[in-house]
Image: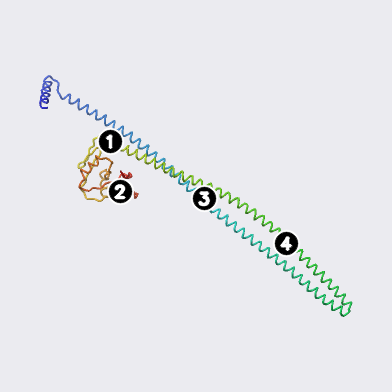
Amino acid sequence: MDVEYERMDIECERKTSKGHPCSRKTGIFVLLGTVCMIIFMIMTSVILFHQQRAFSELESWMNVHSSNRTSVKPDLQITEVQVKNIETLMSNLASSLSSVSSKQEENQQKMEREQGLSHTEVKSLMNSLSSAVSVLTSKLNDAVQDDSQTEVKSLMNSLSSAVSALTAQLNDAVNKQDQKQTETERSLDSLKSSIQTDQQNKQRDLESLSSSLSVLKSSVSDLTSSVASLSSKQQTSEERVMNALKDLISNMSDKTADVPVTCKSGWISYKSSCFLFSSNSLNWTQARDYCKTQGALLLKIQDDDREWAFLNHHTIPTFYWVGLTDQTTGQWRWADDTPYTMNKE
C-alpha cells in the first residue's frame, strides 16, 4: 500500500510539473458526490410524499366506515322506541276492553234489578186483588145467610166495580211492564251490538298492532344482525388497516433509516432519530413535559431488534421512562396517541 501511495504521489508530481493539477479531479469527485446526494434526497422525499398520501387515504376510509357504524345506531334506537310505543298501546287497548266488559256487566245487573222491581209490583197487585176478593166473598156469604137481597146486590155491584178497577190496574201494570221490558230489551240489544262492534274493532286493531309488532321485531333482529356483521367486518377492516399501517411505517422507517440527521448537543443519533438519555430524576409526567419542551416525545418502543439492542446498550443498568400510559382513555397508548398492541408471540 505504501508503494502504491508513493507511485500516486510521483504521478501527481509529474502531472503538476506538466501543468495539470490533481485538485481538478478531486473537485469533480466532490461535485459528483454532491449530485448523487441531492438525487438521493429527492427520491427519498418523493417516496415519503407517496407514503403520506397512502396513509391519508387509509385514514379517510376508516373515518367513512366509522360514520356508517354511528349512523346505524340511531336507527336501531328509533325502532326500539317504536316497539315500546306499540306495547303501551296494546296495554291501553287491553285495559279499555276490560272496562267495557265491566260496564256491560253493570248494565245487565241494573236491568235485572229493574225487572225484579216490576215483578214485585205485579205480585203486590195480585195479592191485594186476592185479599179484596176474599173479603167480598166473605161479605157475600154473610149477606146470603141474612137473606138480604139489596145488600147482596150492592155487594155484587161493589164487588164488580172493585174487580174491574183491580183488573184495569192490573192491565195497566202489565202494559207498563211489557213496555219497560221491550225498551230494556231494545237498549240491551243496542248495547250488545255496540259492544260487539267495539270489540271487533278493538280486536282488529289488536291484530294489526300485533302484526306490526312482529314485523318491527323481525326488522329489529335483522338490523341487529346487520349491525353485528358490519361491526365484525369493520373490525376485520380495521385489523387489515392497522397491519397495512404497520407495514407502511416499517417501510418508511427502513427507507428513512439511512437519511443523515443532525442532533443537538448531548443527543445520540440512531438511524433517522435522535435519542436523549437524561440523568435528571423526574416522574413520568415531568419527563413527558420536558420532552415536549425539547420538541420530542417519550420513547416509543418499535418492533426492531437492532433498535432494541441500541436501547439496551445505552440504558442498562439505569432505568428510564417510556412513553406508554393509560391516563387519558383507561387503555394503554403511546405518547403519540397510537394504541399499544401486545406481541403475544
Q: Is residue 178 above or below residue 331?
A: below
Residue 325 badge: 2
Q: Nearer the viewer, mark 2 or mark 3?
A: 3
Residue 254 badge: 1
Q: At which x and y percent is residue 9?
A: 11, 24
Q: Is residue 216 above or below residue 195?
A: above
Left or right? Give the position of 49 relative to 14: right
Marks 2 and 3 in Cβ contact (< 8 Å): no
Q: At which x and y percent is residue 91?
A: 55, 55
Work out which quarter of the rendered image holds the N terminus and state it.
top left
The foreground one among 10 and 155 is: 155
Residue 83 badge: 3
Q: Nearer the viewer, mark 4 or mark 2?
A: 4
Q: Is residue 201 above or below residue 109?
A: above
Marks 4 and 2 in Cβ contact (< 8 Å): no
Say which label, 1 or 2, has the lower sequence index.
Answer: 1
Distance from disc 1 to disc 2, alpha carbons, whole Å, reads 27 Å
Q: At which x and y percent is residue 52?
A: 33, 36
Which element carries disc 3, helix, strand or loop? helix
Distance from disc 3 to disc 4, alpha carbons, whole Å, reads 49 Å
Marks 3 and 1 in Cβ contact (< 8 Å): no
Can you name the residue that lies furthest to the top here?
18
Say which label, 3 or 1, has the lower sequence index.
Answer: 3
Name the residue beneath numbered marker 4. 181
Distance from disc 4 to disc 2, alpha carbons, whole Å, reads 90 Å
Work out which quarter of the rendered image holds the C terminus and state it.
top left
Answer with the quarter of the image where residue 249 lies.
Answer: top left
